[in-house]
Structure formats: C-alpha cells, structure tokens
Amino acid sequence: MIRDIHEKLLALTDEEKQILNGEIEVDRSLYTDNGQFIIDSDKLLSQGELIDIRKHTRFIKFPEHKHNYIEFNYVYQGELKEIIDNKEINLKKGELIFLNQYINHELEICSENDISINFIIRPEFFDYILSLLDNENIISRFLITTLYTDYKEGEYLYFKVAEDEKVQEILEKIIIELYTDGMMSRVTIKLLVGLLFVELVKTPECIEIYSVDNYDKMIIIQVFKYIHEFYKEGTLLEIAEKLKQPDYKLSKLIKKHTQMTFKELIQEKRLSRAIELLKARDLSVVEIMQKVGYENPTYFYKIFKEKYGVTPMEYRKKDNK
C-alpha cells in the first residue's frame, strides 16, 4: 500500500476523535434517520454512487444493526471481531467477510492498530458483477443465488484468504483507487471488484458460509465443497454419510436449493473441468475424459455436445483461433 494511503488509514477520523474525547455511544445520526438502527446507504454514498469504502470506526463497540446495502469488511491490519446471531467471528489480517443486507450484527471495540475497511455496495451494483461471473461454476452459481433470490434471512460469506496473493493484490488496488480520487475511472473499480469476485469463487475451500435460521444452506455448501474436491468419483451416498444425512433427504435438499440433482451437479463440474483442460491443450481428449471421471467416449462426446453445441475437438479448435 502506498505510504500516503497507509497514513490516511491510520489517521483518526472526526468520529474517532469525538469518541476519544469522551463520546460513549455511536452517533446514530451519522448512519440513519430511521428509529431502528438500519444503516442507510444514502448516508454513506453520494447520489448515483453504487460503491465506496470507509474505515471502520475504532475505540467503541458498534451496536447491533442492519443495513440496506451489501457490505464487505476487509481487515487491513490487526483484527476485527463481529458477533452474528450470537456467534463470534474473529477476522484476521487479510481476511474478508461478505454480509447481505438482512444480516443483524455488532462489532467489538477495535484498538488503534486494528484497521478494517468497509466496502459499501448497493445491491444493484451486482447486476454488473453477474455479467463477469462464470455461470458454469457451481460455487459461483451458489453465490449468485445467495445474492439474487428473494430469501430474506441474514447471511454471510467468510473468506479466509489472507495467504491468497492474487486476492490481496486486487483488494489493495481497489483501496488505492477509491482513496485516490480521479486516478482511474469508476468503470475500473467495477472491473476490479468483478475480478475480486471471480478470484474468490475459485477458492471454495476457503469459504465459510452462514445463514440465519437456515441450516439447509449450510448443508448445501458442504455438498458443493465435496463436489469441488471429489467430482471424479464422488457419490451421493458418500457425501450423505459424511454429513450424517439420509441420502433421500439430502437428494431433496440439493434439488430444492439448486434446481439440479446430485448427478447433474457432478456432471456440470466434470464438464467445466474438461473445458479448463481443453483450453490448456496439454492432454488429449481421451486423457481429459478419463481425468474428469468418464470411461465411455461415446457418452462423453454426447453430453459434451448437448451442453456446448460442439464436440470436444471442435471446441478446442475454436478456442485456438
């Protein structure tokens, strides 16, 4: 992070100065005109803005609240302790949590060296993000469903990505841009946030998901993680045993939340992986077919063409042009 922006992040805000001078409660008028503590994006974003960032207020406990926008909390340095539905989440440096607009949460007191950044994002911003994500990725599909359905319960996605250099590099670029007015266009910010999402959905093993009063969705994300790792030989019976769920019940849950069967999810993952290997051009089609879990070439060619409209060889030739 360039020194000038680093110093801005460490500097005291006017609100923090008031707290250090004896203010014992958060000034709610800075965040909402509503009697309930629902933070209003209009208080934090200029008219027409879809995304901005602000440093999280230190030295005081931030009481339980909701917000009418999507929020990312990113720990720049130190840590951030959040309490969501009586569950304490301890975010460390480099980690990121995604909060939907229905979540009810509070934040413990941060010390001087605990610097967290709140990304404030209006829901309509994600109309653009949707266009950048790969709809064939089952993790991506799950995240999109979380964002765009009419489900009205609080949810979070906790990304333990402190060691992911690509993610950290993108976050740094976004922060620099938002703190450096006029350095690049707002279109570039959208591209960077889109790229961030693309990178995040590549790491399902680093995602912890929580849905208030919705145990089913926690089960489904475990299914997705299992498919991501064991798509070649995984079975419904095996994941049902791992999750201590009857296979018939798990099958119904999968269909309910994804509109697909377990077999269809496995096939989507296998074909998606086959596409990646075809693009790499290191293996023959037969080797790719076997690597993703198929033994019958006729069947593999049939389902591939049904999905993509061309044979694997035709796809590779087209991709090479």
Image (spheres, grey):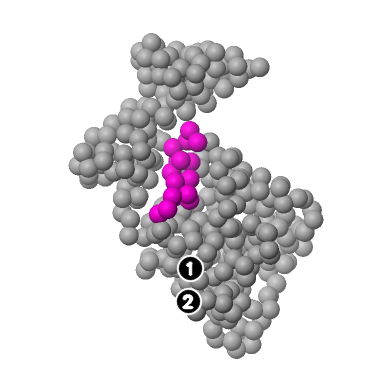
Asked if marks 1 and 2 touch (Cβ < 8 Å), the reply is: yes
Confirm whether residue 310 shows in the render: yes
- What x and y, as percent, mark residue 6? 71, 63
Q: Nearer the viewer, residue 192 or 80?
A: 192
**Looking at the image, is mark 1 or mark 2 earlier in the sequence?**
2
- What x and y, as percent, mark residue 86? 37, 68
Label annotation for residue 66 = 1
Residue 145: within the magenta? yes
SS for callout 2: loop
Q: Amino acid at mark 1?
A: Lys
Q: Nearer the viewer, residue 59 or 237?
A: 237
**Which contiguous range is marked in magenta?**
135-151
- Residue position for label 2: 36
- Count the marks: 2
- What x and y, as percent, mark residue 58? 59, 74
Label annotation for residue 90 = none
Q: Quick one: quadrant of the N terminus?
A: bottom right
